[in-house]
Image (cartoon, rainbow, N blue to C red):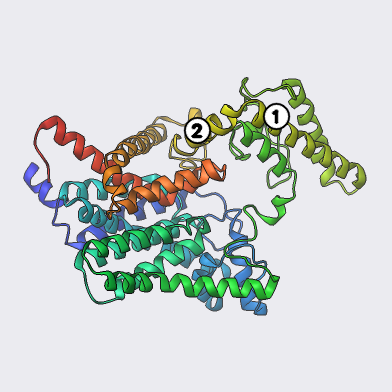
Amino acid sequence: MKQPLNKFFLKDPLKWQFWVLVAFLCKALFFIFQLYRNDLHPLPGFIGVVTGDAPTYFDPIDDLVANSSYSPDFRMPGYGILYLPFAFLFSKAVAYNILIVIQLILASISIYLLALIAKYLFRSSAIFYLTFYFYAISTYTSLFDPALYTESFATSFLILAVFYLLKTLEHESKRPLNIFLSGIFLTEVIFLRPVFMPLVILFSAVLFAYYCRQHQIKNAFSKLFIVLLPFLVCEGAWITRNFIRHNKFIPATTSLYYPEIQNSIYMPFFTLVGAWGGSDQHWDPGTDIRWFGLMDDTHTILDTTNARLPDYIYTSQFNRDSLVILKKQLAIYLSDEFNPNADSTKTKQLFAAINAKCLLYASSIKHEKPFLYYVKAPLMRTKCFLMHSGTYNLFRTATNKLSLLPYSIKLFYSILYLLIIGFGIIGILLLSRRSLMLMPVLITTCIVVYTVLIHPIILGKCEKRYFVPAYPFMLLCATYAITWIYNKISGRAIN
């Protein structure tokens, strides 16, 4: 019995038809499950999930189709360019449906490609199988396939970019197609998620170091030019367009936040909560910022009963009573902001007072509690960023209200996610020597490390979905760690 199962589930990694089919079945089953439980249909005819972010990606394209103008232009057009041909040919709902089906197909293919990346880097069929099956059943990335987020495309394109880069190194082919495709997919990742723009440096460093070791300096420069060409052309066009439109040098986006949030009441509280390492995800029950009762998209004051503030945050400038007063001021401001009969002058004065208090309290933490501000706060945000269930929105019901079967499913996938994070960290440490030598494995480890550094530590953002594009590479590091530990314990290597 064991032998037939092994023959079926452990087929030759080069039999791509089998692996892609299995990957598609795994992805499609979960995709259908999400569509079945989806009760959010703000757009008639669209079967997937419309997110709050969607209009900022697609409205500019609709404007381009209708009026030949890309406006509003807060976003880089990475998602929009994929939507553009379907916007020309079909209704919005049909175009959206086509997009999520393409997301599903690419996500399925990327499972097999990630496993091939693992096999190339570690020369192990065992790691290929582990990577494939772990990634095929992971829900953390699959949750975004039927939704109009950038995460699904960004994850798939990043895997494709790495795959074609390594394919170039593996075959040392003189044909430029593979490295050119790597550059195209990397450019699309950047235009989907501008925060990944520094990956251009990473890809260039690995490519250049590889060919220099082969004493192929001329080849190194030629391959470097080819991989950078798509980015240079597209980025150059985007910068030129922005300079003509705004008379400014804008290489990515105009701001870190939505324009409507940049000067809103959200910003002071983002600053204050971030000073002690709290989460600014006001839609997530239990986060620190939820305690203040910021508004959601329906302009209603959120429930704050599950939120708690830590007791180590206070300084000479504020205490809990100060924050209670601030909370009451916010409630007054929120009730007046959308009230046409409210005194606009008083509302502006109240905003200024709230803003001043938040900045004062945050500054006092910075100067009176530097360890909290510079060390503990980034670590707390990193913990929030990585250490969670990995099953956000798997079921639209609180965990303590789930019946036995969905609770067991959620528990299984949560344990799987946390095991991947734990073993992934071990894998990064084990691979650190090879990474520091600028070997190809640096791409996988550096994508993970960079994603963690840039979001919760540098930008102060700990939204869970921002780690999604890096998760496959964390999983790859985890499978390496698992096989390494097994080999050490058993005293024999598995290939």
Between the residue at mark 1 and the residue at mark 2, the CA separation in whole angstroms equals 19 Å
193 left or right of 224 in image:
right
Which callout, 1 or 2, points at the residue further toward the start of the chain?
A: 1
Q: Nearer the viewer, residue 399 or 270?
A: 270
Observer-side mark, 1 or 2, equals 1
Disc assigned to residue 171: none
Q: Is 47 placed left or right of 304 in the picture?
A: left
For the residue pair 55 and 449, the one nearer the viewer reads as 449
Is 71 positioned to the left or the right of 385 in the image?
right
Q: Amino acid at mark 2?
A: Leu
Q: Residues within 10 Å of mark 1 (few under 14, many from 20)?
A: many
* Drawn side of residue 384 relative to residue 270, left or right: left
Label 2: few (<14), some (14–19) or many (≥20) C-alpha neighbours in 10 Å: some
Looking at the image, which residue is at 49% across and 39% down? 385
Q: Is residue 154 above or below residue 2?
A: below
381 lies above or below 474: above
Residue at (77, 39) in percent of width and height: 355
Coordinates of residue 192 in the picture (x, y in percent): 50, 61
x and y percent of residue 316 in the render? 73, 21
Secondary element at tag 1 = helix
Residue highlighted by disc 1 = 364
For the N terminus, the quadrant is top left
Q: Residue at x 46, y 57 (%)?
A: 198
Q: Quadrant of residue 176?
A: bottom left
Q: Secondary structure at mark 2?
A: helix
